[in-house]
Image (cartoon, rainbow, N blue to C red):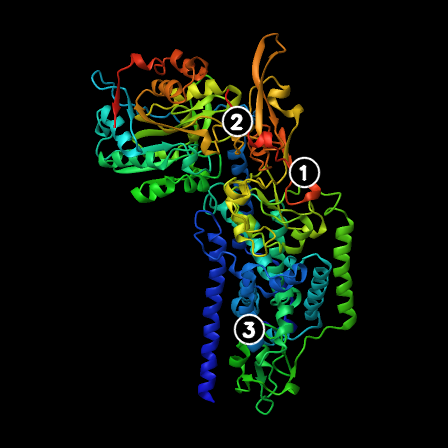
Amino acid sequence: MKSNFRDLLKLRSVRRVAQVFFFSLFLFFVVISDLRYLKGYPASLFLELDPLVAFATAITTHTVYMGLLLSLLLILPTLLFGRIFCNWICPYGILHHFIGWLMGKRRAEERERIEANRYKKLYSLKYVILIGMVVAAVCGSLQIGLLDPICLFHRSMTTAIMPMLNIFIPSSVYVRQYFHMGAWVIGFILFFLVGMNVLIPRFFCRVLCPLGAFLGTLSSFALWRIDRDPDKCVDCDLCLKSCEGASDPHTQLRKSECFVCFNCVEDCPEDAISFKFMPPLKREITAPMVPARRALLGSLVGVGFFAFGRGSGKTDRDYNKKVIRPPGSVEEKDFLDRCIKCDQCIRVCPTNVLQPSLLESGLEGIWTPILNMKLGYCELNCTLCGQVCPTGAIQRITIEEKTGMGPFAEEGPIRLGTAFYDHGRCLPWSMETPCVVCEEVCPVSPKAIYSREVTITKRDGNPITLRRPYVDPALCIGCGICEHECPVTDEAAIRVTAIGETRSRERRLLMDGGVTSSVRGLEKRQR
Amino acid sequence: MSANPDPSETQHPVQEAENRISRREFMVRAGATGALLAGAAAAGRALWKPDHFVPGFQAEKGLQLANYAPEVSKVLPSMAIAHGQDHDSTVRAAIGALGGMSRFIKRGDVVMIKPNVAFDRPAALAATTHPEALRAVAKLVIEAGAAKVFIADNPINSPAGCFLKSGLRQVANDLNLELLYPETNSFSPLQLEGEVLKHWTFFHEPFKKATKVIGVAPCKDHNLCHASMTMKNWYGLLGGRRNQFHQHIHSIVSDFALMMKPTLVVLDGMNVLMSNGPTGGRLSDVKHMGTVVAGTDMVAVDSYGYSHLLERDLAELTYIHKAHDRKLGNKNWKDTLYKEVQA
């Protein structure tokens, strides 16, 4: 018996090593999701391992996209040993474990710690949240990313923490500072969730986490679990002292709540707790406890989220001109079926053009990526966002497919939108000043922006010859570099809007798709 | 008085003693208050600024750039035109005709090489300095005994992508050149008496240590100023709101000849971007010309490039005439000491 105890002691140390390893690995992938360092590393591995991502996207798309099959690797140990993911692998769980420890009462107040780790009815809320999200997914709106810990943590790192580091240490993360619209909202949500550990240890994991709820449901089937020997137990409740999951190891174990952290095994002074294969069912509460009426309420919220979101029209006729999706994105409704708001595309984007939308794309599109040409532009020879997208919201397209080169010449390039001039703000059009930076930077050949030389009489009576720019809608791909480089920087004199995007037949601009034979064969321009 | 008086046993005289403060305590507490007040007053006075100013109109100061030009030679040519098949031998022939790299680079020199990597493009599209041109120049510089070589540019597209996809990062890795990205702290304001360029944020980092400066530029069409060659290449050393330059593009490009006095410039005309510049985008925009021009006079080098590589009428290239008229170089390259060789 004594040797068995020592083995498990070792197991707690192994857990700590695993926690440091997986947390570091997660941070490593966040850091290397950058063109300078990305050398074929599986930068989206944690997102692909996430079974809730695979499960929920399977509901919305009826497929399991590429690397998401890897999530089976996590389902297997959960079905054998329970929610070991939550306390061994999940970087967000590890963060909360550490903060909970840091904020927790120390030795002096043992009783207080024990009380803080008793199960509360509030902890069933995560199952209601999961039900709501699954129901929304069944309807056709993928919302798990709002609270899925991997998506949430990745989003927080990408949009709030990494830019914050670079503000304090310039060029430590980016060559040029990155900015993210509404980063402060995401940053404060992170601070709030982390701070809640002061009131309730592991508040997020116990109360909100839909992935925890998903794995908790699966762990009802686990073959091994923590078990208390009632003959040895003296009811001192010391097993609760460091219980991470608040799973009541001092009485009937709540199997779905246990994070398998093994703290109780070590904390038990009587050796009454051990990790056992198929202990008696009467000594456990097998399934999660979710009151049926609350589950129903959760489902209704899920239905409402979908219906009210769609009813607001942002996915349909009232689509926002500013919702310009990354290259390779699927059609808007399918996009909302797939995007998990992890913001990995935003992390990897080399120009800072990708931004987490807040309400631009409607209720359902919160934190999904859109392009903001004031902050960046879409690099012509770049498909990194699609390379790292774990769910195929942005498909893994090639450069040839994006630019419509080689075998894809017939289809033509992928267009994100179309550029339009605002003559009132354009220097050569209305201010008698030469410019055409837009034409210079236009990356397609032949250029979609062309200019015509005109000689006008200036206000002072003298003539001036300058070039006035035009957009050829058949050639414009909506990359937005013209808008980004326009010297009228507060509101550019040329702006890209979503119309003309190739991903949607409903939103095209030219009847022939912009591929006219006369344009395709346009000869080299000689000045 | 006992050390731990029981409150129930506290007596009247003791209370009175507790209500009074000692002289010592008075001095300490009043002193602390007084010191804080005096400190606040002193700090307020020290920081007090009684005058106002008009935002946006303060006097500007900036750094002056050193003159990196080599000594004028009466014997050796100031420009060499080499024709050949590959970058390495053609660059070698051109610089050899000038008297070899040892004329320009001495043992122990720290050399800044400025390629044009403005765009995120593969080398074949000729919108950026060709990696083989950079490799050939850098090898000669290293052979001449340079202690350190920097490569730096502030591209229009994102820097990491530009250096990676143009192939220049690979050259930097192969030859152990130090690649400097345009980081936030790499810039300082530059002061100049240019026609329009007076005060501008400048990519200063590589020049803190450099003793020699070499520009290696592609030869390309440009939508607004007709051509981007060795003079226009220095655009990539400036930061800030460069998109305003286009309002006075010819003045600005001629100002670059005032701003930078390089040790040597190399114009890579092996493959010339003839149309759709400065970005290019199709192989059909590129023409093989098999020529490299090297020299110490940018105006002469660019004049040759415009008339013989881009094959256009020099009369229309306003910035060359401006630079010539400002005595920043000689547009009549045939009047300079030049040499034409075959690799």
Q: Which residue is mark 1?
A: A499
Residue at disc 3, secondary structure: helix
Alpha-carbon distance for marks 3 and 2?
A: 60 Å
Percent x, y of residue B289? 36, 26
Q: CA distance from mark 2 to mark 1?
A: 27 Å
- Point out the tag, 3 or 2, that comes first from the N-terminus: 3
- Amino acid at pointer 3: Leu
Q: Nearer the viewer, residue A58 or A269?
A: A58
Q: Residues within 10 Å of mark 2 (few under 14, many from 20)?
A: few
Write down the chain letter for disc 1.
A
Residue drawn at x 64%, y 41% is A501
Chain of the residue under label 2: A
The circle drawn on residue A397 is none
Is any part of residue B106 visible from this angle?
yes
Q: Could you tell me which residue is drawn at 48 percent across and 31 percent down?
A: B279
The local secondary structure at tag 1 comes to loop
Mark whose residue sits in front, 2 or 1? 2
* Residue B253, above or below B270: above
Furthest residue in direction bottom, as rendered: A231
On what subunit does the disc labeled 3 rest?
A
Most distant residue in the top direction:
A461
Residue named by callout 3: A76
